[in-house]
Amino acid sequence: MKKKARFGLLAGLSLTASYAAAQSSVTLYGIVDVGVEFINHVPTAGGKSGTQFSVISGGAQTSRWGLRVKEDLGGGYGTTAVLENGFDATKGTLNNSGRLFGRAAYVGLTTPMGELTLGRHPTLTYEFALAYDPVAPAIFSSPAFDPAFVSRADNSVEYRKDVQFLGGKLSLNALYSFGYDSVAGVGPVAGDYRVGKEENALLNYKRGILSIGLLFDEQKGNTLATQSNKTQRFGAGTQIDLDTVKLYGAYRFLAVRAGTGNQYASLYWIGAQYLATPAFNISSDILYQNDKNTGTGNPVMASLLASYLLSKRTDVYLELATVLNKKHTNLGVNGFGTSVVGQTQTGAIVGLRTKF
C-alpha cells in the first residue's frame, strides 16, 4: 500500500510539473547575416571618389540573438520578457553603442486590457518602417534617409491593445520614454523632465486586403543644453495584400524645431513585394525626399532585395540600390554623407542569412 501511495504521489508531482511547464516557455532565437558589399563614389581621405569592397554584417537583417519568455498566469493574464542582442558578425562586436541587449530589453504583463511592458524597446517608428517599407529593415531602404526607422528607446514604457473595429482589427500602440538615449545623452535628469523625453504612437488598421498606419513621434533634445529642441515625425502608410503580390506606399514628415530655427523635410516612397515561388521573394521600392530647408536636398533612391531560400532557415540574397543626387546632395545607399556630393552612387550586396 505504501509503495502504491508513493507511486501515486510521484505520478501526481510529475503531472503537475508537466502542466506548469506547459504554461510557460523560454525561446532562444537569432539571425546571422553576412554579405560582400560593393559601393562606388565613396568619399576618400583626399576628398576624391573611390570604390569600396567590404564584408559586412546585417545587410538584409541585423545579426542578433535573443531570449523570449512567456508565462501564463491564468485568467487571461501573463508575463512576457524579451532580451535581444545585436552584433557585428564580421568582428564579433556589439551594436547599439556597446549595449549587451541593445535591440530590446523589457519585461511586462499581458492582460485582457492590453499589454504593458517596461525597459528598452524598439520604437514604433521602427515598426512603421517594417510594416510599410517592403525592403526594410535592409540597409538600402528608408533607414538611409532617416535613422529613426531603426531606432530604440531606453527608459521606456509601452502599451499595446488590439480591438475589433468596423469589421477589421485596430491596433493601438503607445510608447513613452523618460530618456530615450542614456548612452549618447544624459538620460532622465531630476528637475528637467524634458531631457530625452519621447512620445511615440502608432495606429494600425487592417480589414481584408487593406492595412493603414498612422505614426506620431516627438523627441526632446537629450542633453541639458538641447532639452528645449523638438524633433517631430508624422507618418502615414498603406499596404494592399494581393496574396503573392503586396503593394506599399508611405509618407513621413519631419519637423525639427530648435533655437537656431525650424527645419522641415518630406519623405515619400512606393514599393512592392512579389512571392514568385515559396522559395523566391523580390522586394523593391523607390524613395524621394522633398527637402524644405534642412540642407540635405532632394535625392532619389531605388532599391531591390531578392532572396532565395536554401532551406526553411537559410537563404542567399542580392541587394541592389542606386541613389540619384542633385549637385549639392550627398545621400549614399548607407545614409547621408556616404556619397560624393552630386554623384550617382550604386551599391550591391550578395549575402547569406541563417535563422534559428
Image (tube, rainbow, N blue to C red):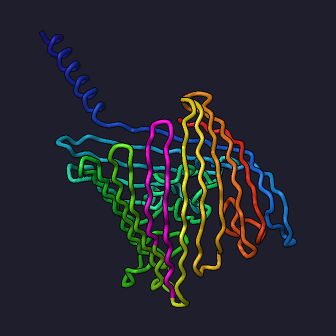
Q: Residue at x 52, y 61 (%)?
A: 149
Is 190 positioned to the left or the right of 165 in the image?
right
Q: Position of residue 67 (x, y in %)?
A: 45, 44
Q: Nearer the viewer, residue 315 or 186?
A: 315
Q: Is residue 222 visible?
A: no
Q: Position of residue 176 (x, y in %)?
A: 36, 67
Q: Position of residue 2 (x, y in %)?
A: 14, 12
Q: Is residue 46 magenta?
A: no
Report the magenta residues as a range: 233-258
Number of disc labels:
0
Q: Nearer the viewer, residue 182 or 356?
A: 356
Magenta segment's dominant SS is strand
Q: Position of residue 52 (x, y in %)?
A: 81, 56
Q: Is residue 269 visible?
A: yes
Q: Residue at x 53, y 55 (%)?
A: 100
Q: Residue at x 34, y 43 (%)?
A: 208
Q: Is residue 244 magenta?
A: yes
In the image, residue 126 above or below residue 329: above
Is 9 positioned to the left or the right of 292 in the image?
left
> Which quarter of the rendering shows the N terminus?
top left
Is 337 positioned to the left or the right of 45 in the image?
left
Q: Residue at x 54, y 47 (%)?
A: 272
In the image, residue 209 above or below residue 121: above
Q: Residue furthest left?
A: 1
